[in-house]
Image (cartoon, rainbow, N blue to C red):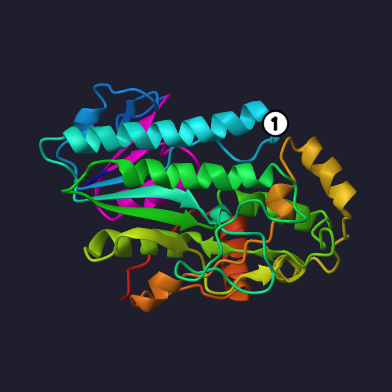
Amino acid sequence: MKIVIPGGTGQVGAVLDRALTGAGHEVVVLTRRPTRDREVWWDGATPGSWAREIDGSDVVINLAGRSVSCRCTPANLRAMMDSRVHSARVVGEAVATAAHPPRVWLQMSTATIYAHRHDAPNDEATGVIGGDEPGVPAYWSYSVDIAKAWERAQDRADTPHTRKVALRTAMVMSPDRGGVFDVLLGLARLGLGGPVAGGAQYVSWIHDQDFVRAVEFLVDRDDIAGPVNLAAPGPLPQRAFMRVLRAARGVPVGLPATKWMAELGAFALRSDTELLLKSRRVVPGRLLDEGFAFDHPHWPEAAVDLVRRARHGTGSARRPVRA
């Protein structure tokens, strides 16, 4: 297949590119800074010659959007919104005007669309969409607004010949340098991987190999459209999540952090505490209902595998899809 990945130069894009290319597919990455033969320039906001790559392709997987690992200033929040909405809109226009449109358009979304909650998991059918929730910072609702607008841009695209799937993705755990797992492992290695603000908030995650397999599964299943949660079936409270990661790395102690300590740490890392404090209790209802079998459903086994691969400097090894 020919697979076009707008915004495919980040951590998640690298995971997909490596696995799909290794499987023998032709992968073209749309990026603002092309450096390889398989990379084509685009600006993520306006039509251009890059649209020729989508015309005649089999699959589009749009990952474009400003990184969420930043301070949630008004300017950064606006950049997050614009980069996601504009890229989804312009990809939709390219799909809609293609003489030979792709048969499926997978659009990255986020598990952040669901409410901050501890009481029950969020699946696609019964999950609570976030908004103006009591007891959480007001700007958290803007992150939910971004997620809603992101999905709405795909939904509004007039692409009758192209199936559309919104990937409500949890944190993708891969051993790649600079990714979220690399950051968390670094904290654990330094003895800083203890509970944050009590650690009751849930962490939803997905192993990189299962992420790739879920994408392949959704490409192959012509009967699945709309929002799909890409998350392992076992989210954990943050204190348990980090305790398991410390055990996998052989670190006996993780210092706890209060909320204000987390604020200082996030400021030093030029990130934001929403990534640490929001409870994302998300489960893959539709994937499980449709028969997808996770290779890494439980965090203890997944953490051991990821730590081993991080130590040996190995990237994503491809696994076959099982239905």
At x 38% / y 77%, what residue is drawn?
A: 289
Q: Residue at x 31, y 65 (%)?
A: 217
> Up-down: is 108 above or below 79?
below
Look at the image and give the residue range highlighted in magenta.
4-32
Provide residue 249's location: percent of width, then percent of height: 72, 65
Give x and y (percent) for residue 221.
25, 65
- Is residue 178 part of the magenta span, yes or no? no
In depth, the one of 213 and 136 nearer the eye is 136
Establish if 246 lies above or below 83: below
Residue appearing at x 35%, y 25% in the figure: 42
Residue matched to label 1: 73
Amino acid identity at mark 1: Thr
Residue 181 in view of the camera: yes
Q: Is residue 18 above or below residue 69?
A: below
Residue 197 in the image: state x and y as whole percent: 84, 59
The percent position of residue 161, horizontal first and vertical second, equals 16, 48
The correct choice, above or below, for 166 with respect to 194 in the image is above
Which residue shows up at 88% across the image and 60% down it?
Answer: 255
Secondary structure of residue under mark 1: loop
Q: Is residue 222 left or right of residue 152?
A: left
> Does the magenta portion include 29?
yes
Q: Quadrant of residue 201?
A: bottom right
* Residue 178 shows up from this direction: no
